[in-house]
Image: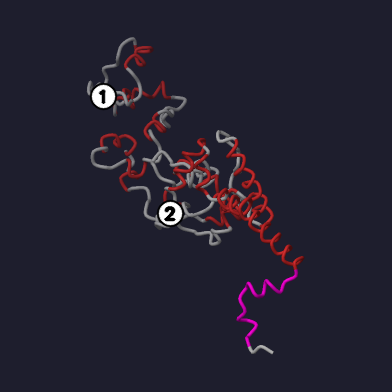
Amino acid sequence: MSDENPQKRSWRERLGNVTPERRKLIVRVAVVVVLVTALAIVPAYVATRPQFMQRYGGMSKQYTAWTESVHAQVACQSCHVPPGRVAQGVYTTRMLGEFYLSLVMPSRQPALFKTPTNAACQSCHIDLRTVSPSGDLNIPHRAHVSVLKLNCVQCHDYLVHEKNPEGTHTPRMETCLKCHDGVKAKNACSACHTNKSVPESHKAADWLVVHASKQKQIDCAECHKWTENWCAECHQRRPASHGKRWRTVHRAAVDKRRNCEVCHEGAFCVRCHGEVPKSNFDPALTIVQ
């Protein structure tokens, strides 16, 4: 009897003790494993990497924006495919097919992705934060998502694949104001901004009258840059003073402070007066463009 430890036998010696039928089975299994790995597992892995999307010309802009976003380390399926083994498995199988289709139809532009769901977002963002990362905004996510049932993408439309007009991936204030209009939701600055409130200068009784002369002293854009032309938002609306009796009483208002030309061209007054009224006239007044 040999004293050699069976565990120390080489694989050749052990294979020599295997019957021919079993040896054939092992070879067949090995061949299948190699083929499955080469034709399915590896291609599926490659196709499910975000870099695979570079071969689709129609996705170049979205791919580039993704590489510059905070989600640059997050795979496509993590957001665009519902969480769960079944959905993720179906996606992987589909992408395996896309791998081979891309080889024979390189110009194909498939519609691969659906809009991310809240469930997909919350698979990573478990803690629905109440303040922005920089701390300058109150954002009660739980109230928006759990109570109001809003979809994350309603606010975060520039998050990954597109930059907003300001060149960032953050939501625009204009988006917030679609709901925070003072009717559907409160629109006070302090409702969202932790470090902002209506400036004391804006609370003056004559602010609407004198604010145009303060532009050199105050950086209006610091608060109002969320829209391209914040002046027009007010100036295109009929002033509150122009009520039903305005035609009758406007002479007294003009005598006190004439600023008709801020909105109206001279020809506007001529329609009724026959000439540009001289009362309290200041040639330096110009029309706001």
> Exactly how many numbered labels are in the figure?
2
Q: In front: 218, or 166? A: 166
* Quadrant placement of the N terminus: bottom right
Q: Is residue 167 magenta?
A: no
Q: Is residue 217 above or below residue 39?
A: above
Dot 1: within a 10 Å radius of its alpha carbon, few (fewer than 14), some, or many (20 or more) residues?
A: few
Which residue is tagged 2? 137
Q: Are marks 2 and 1 in contact (CB under 8 Å)?
A: no
Q: Is residue 229 above or below residue 175?
A: above
Hey, which residue is sitting farthest front in the picture?
A: 1
Distance, label 2 to label 1, CA atoms, is 40 Å
Residue 176 x, y percent position in the rendering: 49, 44
Q: Residue at x 62, y 79 (%)?
A: 9
Q: Residue at x 65, y 46 (%)?
A: 94
Over which residues does the magenta segment extend?
Answer: 4-19
Q: Is residue 5 magenta?
A: yes
Dot 2: within a 10 Å radius of its alpha carbon, few (fewer than 14), some, or many (20 or more) residues?
A: some
**Colour basis:** secondary structure
Residue 87 x, y percent position in the rendering: 67, 52
Hey, which residue is sitting farthest right in the picture?
A: 21
Q: Is residue 131 left or right of residue 30?
A: left
Q: Is residue 167 left or right of residue 161?
A: left
Q: Secondary structure at mark 2?
A: loop
Q: Is residue 192 above or below residue 240?
A: below
Which residue is tagged 1? 285
Q: Residue at x 51, y 40 (%)?
A: 55
Kind of residue indicated by mark 1:
Leu
Q: Residue at x 27, y 20 (%)?
A: 279
Nearest to N terminus: mark 2 or mark 1: 2
Residue 216 x, y percent position in the rendering: 23, 38
* Quadrant placement of the C terminus: top left
